[in-house]
Image (spheres, rainbow, N blue to C red):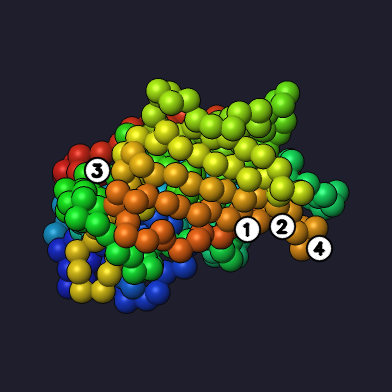
Amino acid sequence: MLSRIALRGLATGIVVMLAASNAAAHHSFAPHFDRTRTVNISGTVKEYEARNPHSYLHVNAVDENGRTREYVCESHGVTQLTRIGITPQILKAGIQVRLTGPISRHSPYMCFFEIVELADGRILNVNGPGGSQQTPPQAKLPPRKDIFGTWLLAPALRRSSNPQPKMQLTAAGEKAVAAYDPFKDDPVFRCDPVAVARVWQAPSTPLEIVRNGADVVLHHEWMDVRRVIHMSMKTHPKDGARSSLGHSVGHWEGDTLVIETGNYSAGVLEQYVERQGQPTTGLLHSSALTTIERLHVDAERQSLIVEVDITDPEFFKQPPARMTMEYSPSDLKIEPFKCSPEGLTGTIRNAGK
């Protein structure tokens, strides 16, 4: 049985080490967790909330005063964790565990667990065997000649929550940013996929591109996004419905699929924007947003290249810089995401009871 860790010098029921974390960055990580402060928590599993987009492990641990407290540690979604062997079956209530990962910036009783050590000696890394966000090894796949098939975002080009490029906002854009609270208003908390740029950046969840008659369908596992690219349409419905993913029409330029999307509802481009010495904010867009995506295959490198150009004259004085993502061929099966709405503030309130 794992021994519980006694606290020295902190009244948090955890051991804190100043060390860099290996956690791969994603949009919501840095504002919520401190990579420079790694914590160890040993105790008994109370509950494992196995869900998407994030899972939560509740552990009862004894602090330095001998008081049992509940610690709540977040991690990746259940689909991703299950693929690498961290299943609800091994995290049953009552088992002894030791968790290691970055401490929360919001509560001393929360963390992001990266390493799970079990009483039988097994050590599981939520980011894969190499310690960085990886997916299980895949069989060698036949060469890809076009964009169709299943793909996975390449780790080297995953965007992080590092400072964003400087952008000149209009007065309306600045007003929208000022009214947005990233810690309460992040659309992901209510299972909204945000916008197409965010969907393209979802790590460790596969994308399948298929034909559906004359149309092309982009089926992302993340948030169960299914985008129909209308290849026989030239324009968007004038009075059509508006949504965070808009309405897409497409055409081919040689082997490149060009997707033009409009009919967006006003929303969020980047949930978290960090600038040194300034509070975390977000990057908003108006209903005037339009995007152009270009998809093509680099046959020599066996990569799907995705370029996204954004235009929003109501919120931006000039268009943001082009975004470029790279995807690798995959044989992963797309699983139902079944996102569960979550509220960070409620989780924090219940931690440490």
- Vertically, is 314 above or below 5? above
The secondary structure type at the circle numbered 3 is: helix
Q: Residue at x 19, y 55 (%)?
A: 171
Q: Residue at x 41, y 59 (%)?
A: 319
Q: CA distance from mark 2 to mark 3?
A: 34 Å
Q: CA distance from mark 4 to mark 1?
A: 14 Å
Please name the amino acid that badge 2 sits on. Answer: Ser
Look at the image and tell me in which quarter the C terminus lies. top left
Q: Which residue is mark 3?
A: 185
Q: Earlier in the sequence, mark 3 or mark 1?
A: 3
From the top left corner, tell me how far across and down residue 245 is, in percent: 45, 36
Q: Residue at x 33, y 65 (%)?
A: 167
Please name the amino acid that badge 1 sits on. Answer: Glu
The secondary structure type at the circle numbered 1 is: strand
Q: Which residue is mark 4?
A: 300
From the top left corner, tell me how far across and down residue 202 is, in percent: 50, 49
Q: CA distance from mark 3 to mark 1?
A: 29 Å
Please name the amino acid that badge 4 sits on. Answer: Glu
- Vertically, is 39 above or below 84? below
Q: Which residue is mark 2?
A: 303
Nearer the observer: mark 3 or 4; the answer is: 4
Please name the amino acid that badge 3 sits on. Answer: Asp
Q: Is residue 51 left or right of residue 6?
A: right
Q: CA distance from mark 2 to mark 1?
A: 6 Å
